[in-house]
Amino acid sequence: MLNKEIYQADQDTAWCPGCGNLPLRNVLADVLAELELSPTDVAMFTGIGQAAKMVHYIKVNGLNGLHGRALPPALGMRIANHKLKVIVESGDGDTYGEGGNHLLHNIRRNPDIAHFVHNNQIYGLTKGQASPTTEEGTTTTVQPNGITAKPFNPIKFAVAMEASFVARGFVGNQEQLKELMKEALNHRGYALIDILQPCVSFNKLNTYQWYSKRVYQLDEQYDPTDYQAALQKAEEWGDNIPTGVIYRNERPIFRDKFPQLDDNTPLVEKEINPKELSELVDEFK
Amino acid sequence: MKLNLVVGGAAGQGLKTLNYILSKTFFRKGFSIYSSKDYMSRVRGGHNFMSIRIGDEEITGPTTEEDILLALNEETIELHQDKLVDDSTILYDGELEDRRSVNLSASEIAKEIGNSKVASTVFIGGVLKILGLDLAETKEVLDEYFEDEEIKEINYKALEAGYQEVETDYQLPSVSKTDNQILIDGNQAVGLGAVMAGVQFYSAYPMTPSTGVMNYIANQENKLGIVVEQAEDEIAAINMAIGASYSGVRAMTGTSGGGFALMNEGLGLAGVAETPLVIAEVQRPGPATGLPTRTEQSDLSFVINSSQGEFPLVVLAPKDAQDAFHQTFRAFNLAEKYQLPVIILSDQFLADSKKNITEFDLDSLTIKRSIMSDEEAEKIEDYKRYQLTEDGISPLAYPGQLEDEVVVFDSDEHDQEGHITEDADTRVKMVDKRAKKIEKLIDEDLAEPEYIGPEKIDYLLVGWGSTYGPLLEAREKLAQDDCQVGVLSFSDVWPLPTAKLEEKAENIELIVVENNSTGQFSKLIRSETGIKASEKILKYDGRPFTGFELYNAIKEEVMF
């Protein structure tokens, strides 16, 4: 196990005191240390939002890109270099709102990416507007008559799309969250963990207490490879919210589908010499 | 000698195959060739035509006058009446009351041979006979084009039958085969330039007329270990390419105006995060969906001003297929040297026109990587992705390359380590750092426009990008009338090189020629140099200029 301090996960942040991002960062540093992944072995891709600032608060390679666009550059790296562990870290707005189209298509592609979604059911950075997962009817500064849309159920969506790994975690249960993150990082394929966490400044409904009263851990009897059972579990929300691996399947990862990619040498280590490509010019003769 | 052969019909009637086989035949025989497409945005029906201009000297652009019209349907004859001349020949499958018509019952012959699909090959035989050419090269081309032996046989028969059926009129001058020529279109040249420059990742969303670039590169992917990914949208396309570039490989995306509009945010990301990126923007008329299969040069102002905020970028507008290859190759070296986005601003006219050009000299090509070497990487301590340097260029490493160091890339304003900052002083330093790179580029790498013409001239014609070929033809025609005209044609359009323009424009009337309605390049010249064009020749009907049209416009509008 590596020394957790190498990730510098104890430095100051712009997050509010009590923010769910803080314990999440702590768990992430534990996970990286336990998996013996050094900062240079990992590349983290984020979008925009409070969660997306993770790149700046934990020492790993990182690309802090555009709002909703964390998945596409991560996919670019997945092609270029298969040796690094790729993590996408982003919020509920970033992933399910602005980035919805990329989520859909990357579940189809199944790239080897662990995606940790900080789901606090509100837009924190822009001060409290609805996110795709905020409860219907909630009033906010821009929705004074209440939110008119049904909340997005990321678990049900991902299971229905047969994503290869779908889990729910809760920052109030750090031991379980740590195990889920480790499993996601070791999973070959796209692994989505929807992580429930409070926004202490703007979400007055979904607090630590609210979540703590409702979440329960899936027991060992539950079989995450059973698609029908997973669909049923995905429906559960309200008084009882299941946490743990809800669905898992084994299928080829994105990179495996490119016969032209060499399994040993990443693209970035290959050299091209134009002088050896004269046959390409001959095709136009 | 120059002769224009036009093949017209509905989409789905096999025009593409006809064009390919005829063009390749003429090319293999040693003729100079320029072929262009005029097609509608539909899969079946409508009216499409392909022009194949051949001659015994270099041809740089299309013409509207039609010497031979191969009409695959009656509508073609109606639509092309005004482009036919007294000694034109119309090749048609049917009875026509026109003394210029030659009847070739291609469908009947094809049926007799046993496959109605080979009617177009019957026509090819007919065309070759009309021109007084033999069939040797065509057989060779058919042999390469079809894989199945039976299909090959039936096509040879169709070719012979068509050849026997018509009488010959023309006698083309004899030309000799040259072995240093290739026949290539603008999109293929961009794709080949990218492949030669070492592109390893190309992501795009299909959009006419840029799709040909993606098709070309995808065609090479298994052979060369390149990955082409069809993105879910243009936003994903550019962001994927940025992720691949961050990972250390040469990456590219391509699109047309509307797709480029979607890519704008990503372009700014490449700019602020100083990521090498090459983007092919193959223009079509806009705004919004515009004319999807037609041509225009109306994205210039948009492209050079693209994305919010201020950051350096480079825009290169290739003149022809030869230039498209070299500019694309160069774009990759520039993007990496200066760590910025480079846009290849092409257009449908260039993209879809095939021309014979001198084979590329591969020995002259050098891939200049600007990412640090592994030896340099080993020595790095305390790596700063955005280190402040004299020339604004920071050492570039990729994730995983450094032993104990990380590479942090940021869309926010950032400090030297790549971390978010709102510090006023750092902001100014970073803006200045990015701007310095373009100063260096202007000093070291910016290319002045090409000048063609005599030393002493009466008028200076100024163009950019694909108007080059038609401008050359117009200049030659004007010279034949003893009118001394020079052409100044720009490939580097942003930043705008000004030295040669200032020298040539002194005491001379400047005529700017552009495929748009507002004279965007003329405005750019004026804002960058203060030089005002005395005349503008603008075309924005979705069709390219022809040399003859430019010649007429200059004679009538400029000289009176």
Image: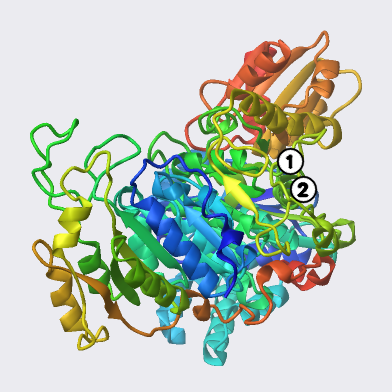
Mark closer to the chain start, 1 or 2? 1
The kind of residue tagged 2 is: Pro
> Is residue A206 shown to the viewer in this render?
yes
- Name the quadrant containing residue B192: bottom right
**Place of residue B249 in the rendered image (x, y in percent of width and height, measured from the top left):** 67, 61
The answer for which chain carries disc 2 is B
Residue farthest to the bottom, as pictured: B150
Left or right: residue A145 compared with residue B24: left
Left or right: residue B538 compared with residue A145: right
| Mark 1, other Cα within 10 Å: few <14 / some 14–19 / many ≥20 | some
Q: Which residue is labeled 2 in the image?
A: B395
Coloring scheme used = rainbow
Q: Is residue A13 above or below residue B127?
A: above
Are the residues tagged 1 and 2 within 8 Å (C-beta)?
Answer: yes
The kind of residue tagged 1 is: Gln
Q: Which residue is labeled 1 in the image?
A: B387
